[in-house]
Every structure is written in C-alpha cells, then in structure tokens.
Image (cartoon, rainbow, N blue to C red):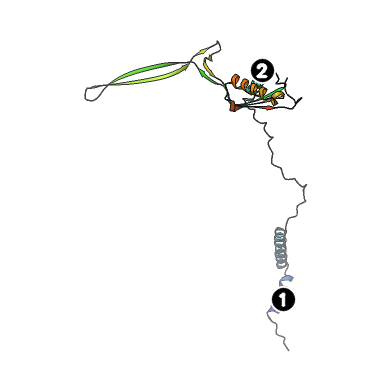
C-alpha cells in the first residue's frame, strides 16, 4: 500500500537529494556559515560592553580666592598724628595725669590749586547766497593749572583743614570737675570745635595711656 508523503516529507527528500550533490552541498555549507557569522555579529553588538573600572577620580573643588586684606583708611594716619599731639598738650595740664585721646575725622584736607584763565576768541565771516555777510564769534574760556617747584607739580593756592567729627579724651584727673572743664576747653580751643563735639571721661589710675 503506497504511503502518502506530506509537504514536510517532500522538503526533507529534496534536502537529502541536494546534500548528495557535491556542488549543492558546498553552497548549503556556505549559506549556513554566513547565517552563523551574522548571528554572532549581532549578538556581539547587543551585548553590553564591560570596561575595567579605572581609579576613582575625586570631584574637583572650586577654587576659593584668598581673602583680601581690609582696606586701610587713609584718614587714620592723620587722626593718629593729631591724637598724639593732643595727648602731649593735655598731659601738661595740672592734675590731668595720664591722658589718652581718640580723634575721629569726617574728611581729610582739601587742596585748591592755582590756575590761570585763558580766553580765546575767534571770528568767522561768511557770505550767504544773497550777497550779504554774516559774522560768527566763538569764545572759549580755559583754566590751566600753574606749575612750579621744578617738578612740574601744580601750585597749591589754598588748603582747607581736615574736618573733625569728634574727640574723646580719657584722663586720670578728669574725675575732678575743674580738670575736666579745663581739658574740654583746651581741646575745643585748639581744634576750633564746639563743646558738644568734645567728650572728656575719667580714666582708671594706671590704665594704658600715654604720659
């Protein structure tokens, strides 16, 4: 009794027949090798790449600029010099004892420089289209600083003294009302200050102050 073969049997029979043919068999092997190579290539691209861990790098810290030095008050040397002069004067007052003075300046000295005013005048005459004449006068005034001293320095014509905001005096003998009044009057007179800008306090005996 004949046995019917399905589609699978026919394909298997055709493959067996092709495998027996040497040339057909070589073509099948090449095709199989090509399929395997493509599969391996795709698998290599899809696989995550593992890289050896390198040494840990610490995050860089922001560079911090060094703190700048505090700005020096240009009035401080003037105030210190004036305070030292007042200490020397007030210490000579009878009964004052040791004296310490602090001077606070509102502003430094102001200088006015000598200058010469130069005036220049220029006249221009123009003739218009109608035959008439028009005169234009241009005048310029300039101030030029006067130099002297052999170093090309500007000559100073006037100096406004420093402005004193207030004076504090600490004296051992200021506990005596008469001594305190004398010190207050001396400071106000010498520095041309109103009395309300001068304060005199009694200091402890032996406190650090100039003699």
Q: Nearer the viewer, residue 189 or 145?
A: 189
Q: Residue at x 39, y 17 (%)?
A: 119
Q: Which residue is mark 2?
A: 89
16 up-or-down from 119: above or below: below
**In the orientation shown, which residue stands out farthest toward the bottom?**
1
Rendered image quadrant of residue 17: bottom right
Displayed quadrant of residue 191: top right
| Position in image of residue 60 (x %, y %) | 71, 43
Q: Is residue 92 above or below residue 200?
A: above
Q: Which residue is pictured at 68% across the width and 28% down the height?
A: 201
Percent position (x, y) of residue 78?
Answer: 63, 22
What's the residue at 61%, 21% (across, down)? 185
Q: Disc 1, disc 2: CB below 8 Å?
A: no
Q: Nearer the viewer, residue 100 or 140?
A: 100
Sooner in the amino-acid sequence: mark 1 or mark 2:
1
How far across and how far down the image is residue 55, in percent? Answer: 78, 47
Q: What residue does disc 1 label?
A: 12
In which quadrant of the rendered image does the N terminus lie?
bottom right
Q: Give the CA distance from mark 1 to mark 2.
A: 130 Å
At mark 1, the secondary structure is: helix
Density class for disc 1 (Cα within 10 Å; few <14, some 14-19, many ≥20) is few
């Amino acid at each position: 009794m004949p046995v019917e073969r399905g589609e699978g049997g026919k394909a298997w029979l055709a493959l067996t027949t092709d495998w027996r043919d040497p040339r057909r068999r070589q073509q099948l092997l090449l095709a199989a090798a090509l399929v395997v190579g493509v599969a391996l290539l795709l698998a290599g691209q899809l696989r995550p790449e593992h890289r050896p861990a390198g040494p840990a790098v610490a995050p860089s810290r922001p560079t911090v600029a060094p703190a700048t030095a505090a700005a020096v008050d240009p009035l401080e040397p003037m105030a210190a010099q004036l305070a030292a002069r007042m200490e020397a004067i007030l210490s000579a007052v009878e009964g004052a004892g040791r004296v310490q003075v602090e001077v606070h300046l509102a502003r430094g000295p102001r200088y006015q420089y000598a200058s010469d005013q130069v005036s220049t005048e220029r006249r221009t005459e123009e003739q218009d289209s109608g035959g008439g004449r028009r005169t234009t006068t241009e005048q310029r005034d300039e101030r030029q600083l006067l130099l002297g001293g052999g170093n090309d320095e500007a000559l100073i014509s006037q100096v406004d003294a420093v402005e004193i905001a207030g004076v504090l005096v600490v004296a051992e003998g200021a506990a005596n009302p008469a001594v305190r009044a004398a010190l207050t009057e001396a400071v106000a007179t010498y520095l041309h200050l109103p009395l309300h800008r001068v304060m005199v306090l009694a200091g402890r005996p032996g406190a650090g102050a100039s003699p």
